[in-house]
Image: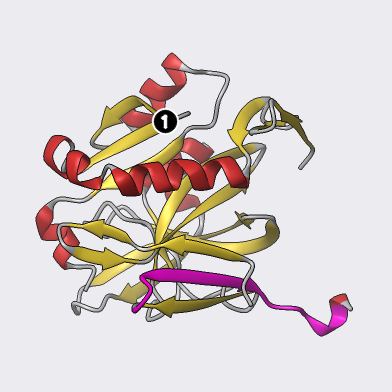
Amino acid sequence: MYDYRFPYRLWYGIWSPFATVRLFYDKKSATAEAYVDSGAFYSIFGSVVAASLGLTITSGARKRVRLADGRMITVYLHRMGFCLGEEHFPSTIGFSDELDIGFNLLGRFSIFDRLMFCFNDHERMLYVSRIEREHEG
Amino acid sequence: MAVEIREGKYEYDTETEKLAPTYEELMHWFLWVNEHTSEFEEKYPGKYLAIWDYEIIAVGEGAEVYEEAQHRRPDVIPYIVYVPSEEEAVLLV
């Protein structure tokens, strides 16, 4: 069973899992999409989404993180509202202009404890389910 | 967040005072992008697209895409899509 599903996107012959999300910050919101990366701890969004939210990237909590290619970059963490489908919850999202790729990345921290992602490469489909939390009954 | 559904496919956010697509409508736009990736790879590699209702309302290489979209449609929250360059797409594997 799943609550949402996103067909993989084909860029240059490579099928990749993207999901549409909305972020809410200080009475502004942005609608964007992100590459779902279960190997990433933090979500990292770029300057375009930050501009849409009226967010000063460097005002967040500074973290140095290592990318899969070995580079170290600075990411600034911000608390904000996160929405995928009908699922709304507060989250911590990283912003950086050092990623050097235009994609936003959706990582595990404060997201994967609320939503479960299933990557079905055979069907080329990303399935997303809400995680029922005990204290929410 | 307080929203009102309009025309069955938009949410009017009373905090931002802007229209945004409902989830169902946004999924249609997402699939529309999926159907046009070959065309976008050719026309817009390395560019951001601001999309509203199956129409590209702004194209840019950075935050200016949002400003241009707001200039054209100040009443909406556009759907921002990034079209990778071929080199970037390889990074996805």
Tell me the quarter of the picture where residue A83 sits: bottom right
User: From this viewpoint, is residue A91 visible?
Assistant: yes
Which residue appears farthest toward the bottom when viewing the image? A134
Q: Position of residue A26 (x, y in %)?
A: 65, 41
Q: Residue A126 magenta-drawn? A: yes
From the image, which quarter does the N terminus of chain A lie in?
Answer: bottom right
In the picture, measured across the screen, residue A61 lies left or right of residue B22, that is left
Q: Is residue A86 above or below residue A68?
A: above
Question: Which residue occupies 52% across, 64% down?
Answer: A5
Q: Residue B58 magenta-drawn? A: no
Q: Position of residue B24 (x, y in %)?
A: 60, 46
Q: Tag 1, which chain?
A: B
Q: Nearer the viewer, residue A24 or B89?
A: B89
Determine which residue is flagged by label 1: B54
Going by the numbered disc 1, the residue's amino acid type is Tyr
Region rendered in magenta = A122-135
Q: Is residue A53 above or below residue B68?
A: below
Question: Which residue occupies 16% across, 59% down?
Answer: B88
